[in-house]
Amino acid sequence: QVQLEESGGGLVQAGGSLRLSCAASGGTFSQYDMGWFRQAPGKEREFVAAITSRSIGRFYADSVKGRFTISRDNAKNMVSLQMSSLKAEDTAVYYCAAATRTFTVARSATYDYWGQGTQVTVSS
């Protein structure tokens, strides 16, 4: 069983930055592909970014490309999401997810484990 815990959310002004972190435990983190998703009120959960197990592949939604950066530290069992130039439309609960088998980057159904989420609110 894999446990994921997000941290780093909060309130920030438009144009500002935040760094989200996700700590993993209970599994072999270095073997998992990891992703970040978000869900805004009244909207479906959407893909934000993903990174393969050895950081060879990094993928981003068009809406965050050039503003967000995903990274991981397998020695610390951590994955991070550096968010810059934040916009009001980035406001959402952000979730960390782990894919322990073959995954499709942007398909939430292919991720096996999820964190509880962390709220990011961007004021305009």
Image (cartoon, grey):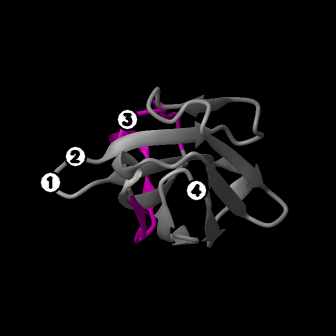
Looking at the rendered structure, the kind of residue marked 1 is: Gly
Horizontal relation, residue 101 to residue 70: left or right: left
Mark 4–mark 2 distance (CA, rounded to whole Å): 25 Å
Instruction: Name the disc covering residue 16, or none.
Output: 4
Report which residue position mark 1 lands on: 42
Instruction: From this view, report whether residue 81 is shown above or below residue 118.
Output: above
Report which residue position mark 3 lands on: 107
**Which percent across, then down, holds residue 115?**
45, 67
Mark 4–mark 3 distance (CA, rounded to whole Å): 28 Å
Q: Nearer the viewer, mark 4 or mark 1?
A: 4
Q: Nearer the viewer, mark 3 or mark 2?
A: 2
Q: Are marks 1 and 2 in contact (CB under 8 Å)?
A: no
Horizontal relation, residue 106 to residue 81: left or right: left
Locate the C terminus and report the quarter of the image it occupies: bottom left
N-terminal-most mark, 1 or 3: 1
N-terminal-most mark, 4 or 1: 4
Q: Nearer the viewer, mark 4 or mark 3?
A: 4
Residue at 66 percent of width and 56 percent of height: 80
Which corner quadrant of the image does residue 85 belong to?
A: top right
Mark 3–mark 2 distance (CA, rounded to whole Å): 12 Å
N-terminal-most mark, 4 or 3: 4
Point out the stretch of residues depicted in magenta.
101-123
Q: Observer-nearest residue: 117 or 25? A: 117
The crowding category of the residue bearing disc 1, from other C-alpha atoms within 10 Å (few below 14, some 14 to 19, many at least 20), is few
Q: Are marks 4 and 1 in contact (CB under 8 Å)?
A: no
Report which residue position mark 2 lands on: 44
Residue at 71 percent of width and 63 percent of height: 78
**Which percent across, then down, holds residue 26?**
62, 72
